[in-house]
Amino acid sequence: MSAAERVAVVTGGAGALGLAAARALLEDGLRVALVDLDAMRLDMLSRFLRGGRIVVAADVTDPVAVRAAHERVRAELGPVDILVNAAGATAGAGIAATDEGAWRRVMAARVDGTFLWSRAVLPEMASRGWGRIVNVGSARPVGPGAGTADAAAAGAVAALTASLAREGAARGVTANAIAPVFVRSPGTTELLTEAQRRQALAAIPAGRFGEPEEFAHAVRFLASPLAGYVTGTVLDLDGGLHLG
């Protein structure tokens, strides 16, 4: 199957990482559905993209909305070959300062959304003998800004990725996660105080923050046919920060 025949879904498509991933996949000739709750921003940003794409306003935490969005993608583009779960939320606070609303919001966006979309597409991928699932998460959330809910959600996504990988491996479906830490985006690096920024840059061996395009390149590889022997992994995209 050529790239032009493949269909990708990117959740969190209006965010910095999701948009970068969608752009990279479109550049490779894929047809892409960008999914996000922020319909207005999603529509505006999509106008600057080139290639076969649709925008789908949907709440990734709502099972009914996910089902409807999936059905629309199948009707307009075809069966989903690649899923990039880039939707998320953050609450950079310790346990004492994390209320139930913040906890539920982070877990719903990052864990429930990944589960719901993966459940929607994996059976069909398996029946067709080919599929790629790329999640955003980390088993080792580190550095300033990573709160209690963020850490719990990241660990859950890593475990879910391993489960998906085991289930899909024999049927041509891979599942991997990318762990982006301090990649430039409004929801991460731009929320740091100046003191946190200096502390982070001093701790990162590469001495700089990552770029959304670097995240997108990692997605491009894990979503490619040549990544068929890579599954169940968490790729640290952190400039060496995980080395300690």
Image (tube, rainbow, N blue to C red):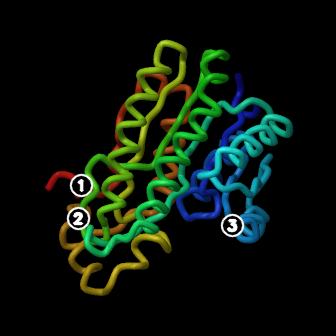
Q: Is residue 76 left or right of residue 82?
A: right
Judged by depth in the image, the label closer to the viewer, 3 or 1, is: 3
Given the image, on which type of amino acid does mark 3 rest?
Answer: Asp
Residues marked 1 and 2 touching at CB (< 8 Å) = yes
SS for callout 1: loop
Precedes in sequence: disc 3 or disc 2 = 3
In the image shown, does 160 or 84 lie closer to the viewer?
160
Between 153 and 132, the residue placed more toward the observer is: 153
Label 2: few (<14), some (14–19) or many (≥20) C-alpha neighbours in 10 Å: many
Find the residue positioned furthest to the top: 170
CA separation in Å, label 3 and label 1? 33 Å
Mark 3 or mark 1: whose residue is earlier in sequence:
3
What distance separates the C-alpha of mark 3 from that of mark 2?
32 Å
Check residue 204 in the rendering and tell me which mark sits there, or answer none. Answer: 2
Residue type at mark 2 is Ile
Using the image, tell me which numbered label, if any, was put on residue 38: 3
Query: Mark 1 — residue?
Result: 240
Q: Residue 163 occupies which quadrant of the picture?
A: top left
Q: Residues within 10 Å of mark 1 (few under 14, many from 20)?
A: some
The residue that appears at 41% across and 27% down in the rendered structure is 230
Residue 201 x/y as whole percent: 25, 72
Residue reaching furthest to the left: 244
